[in-house]
């Protein structure tokens, strides 16, 4: 048994407070994801895909080296919205929201830092950037392709795996709010669009609507496809 930070009444009080705050936060995130899904007219059931962590389920094999963040899979989490088509256009879109609650490890030199990973190669928060210097994000990711093909760029960089994709998207231009990255070419039949927003911009309905409309304009400028019918393509 190793020493832990959970050794005093005060630390246990902070733990209870943090758990209740996390509950309220994650409930809000679910509501935000459902709101975005409805605004963008994705009709399928929303699916969940924890990233990096392997959430604890029935008969989950707990073992030495189990990453503690496996118990909090919302650390990096994908809300997959499914597929939709566009009226009068031969295209379809696959869409996800990806929440990253702490980007403290998304630095170019993280794995060079002392104690960055444990014996089981799991990243350790003690080596993260300070919480006050880190950020929390909600990224919009959409792959648009012709209806007669599969969206081959989905959750990848060309030739790379999904984990490489996420590392690249959240590490490069790390502090750049609303940064847009694109892959492929709409003119050639497929384009993937990634745009990340600070979670602070989802504090209320008005600011969430502004974010959604910003992403819709990004997609429109690249494809001339309207995610929200009749939405002006001018500035808010």
Image: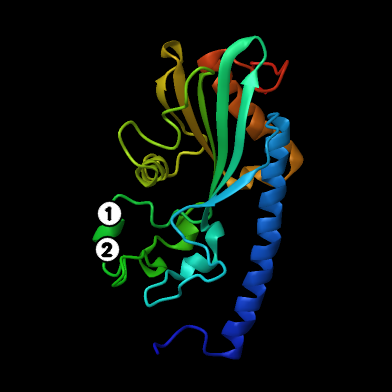
> What residue is pinned by disc 2?
113
CA gap, disc 1 and disc 2:
7 Å
* Residue placed most toward the observer, 188 or 220: 188
In the rendered structure, the answer to whether residue 118 lies left or right of residue 66 reads left
- Helix, strand, or loop for circle 2? loop
| Quarter of the figure with the C terminus | top right
Residue 71 percent coordinates (x, y): 53, 68
Figure check: 177 above or below 224: below
Q: Residues within 10 Å of mark 2 (few under 14, many from 20)?
A: few
Residue 93, horizontal then vertical, whole percent: 56, 26
Q: Are marks 1 and 2 in contact (CB under 8 Å)?
A: yes
Crowd band around label 1 with a 10 angstrom C-alpha radius: few (<14), some (14–19), many (20+): few
Q: Secondary structure at mark 1?
A: loop
Is residue 7 placed above or below 113 in the rendered structure?
below
Write down the quadrant of residue 172 in the picture.
top left
Mark 1 highlights which residue? Answer: 109
Could you tell me which residue is drawn at 41 percent across and 71 percent down?
Answer: 66
């Amino acid at each position: 048994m190793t020493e832990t930070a959970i050794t005093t009444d005060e630390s246990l009080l902070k733990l209870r407070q943090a758990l209740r705050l996390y509950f309220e936060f994650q409930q809000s995130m679910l509501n935000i994801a459902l709101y975005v899904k409805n605004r963008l007219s994705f009709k399928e059931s929303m699916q969940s895909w924890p990233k990096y962590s392997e959430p604890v389920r029935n008969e989950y094999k707990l073992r030495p080296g189990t990453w503690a963040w496996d118990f909090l899979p919302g650390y990096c989490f994908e809300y997959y919205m499914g597929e939709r088509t566009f009226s009068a256009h031969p295209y379809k879109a696959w869409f996800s929201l990806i929440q990253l609650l702490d980007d403290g490890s998304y630095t170019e030199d993280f794995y060079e830092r002392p104690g960055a990973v444990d014996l089981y190669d799991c990243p350790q928060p003690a080596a993260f950037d300070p919480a006050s210097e880190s950020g929390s994000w909600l990224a919009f990711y959409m792959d648009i392709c012709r209806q007669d093909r599969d969206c081959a760029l989905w959750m990848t960089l060309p030739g790379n795996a999904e984990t490489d994709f996420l590392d690249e998207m959240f590490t490069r231009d790390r502090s750049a709010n609303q940064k847009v990255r694109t892959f492929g070419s709409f003119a050639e039949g497929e384009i993937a669009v990634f745009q990340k927003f600070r979670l602070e911009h989802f504090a209320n309905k008005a600011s969430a609507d502004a974010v959604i409309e910003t992403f819709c304009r990004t997609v429109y400028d690249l494809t001339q496809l309207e995610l929200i019918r009749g939405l002006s393509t001018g500035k808010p």
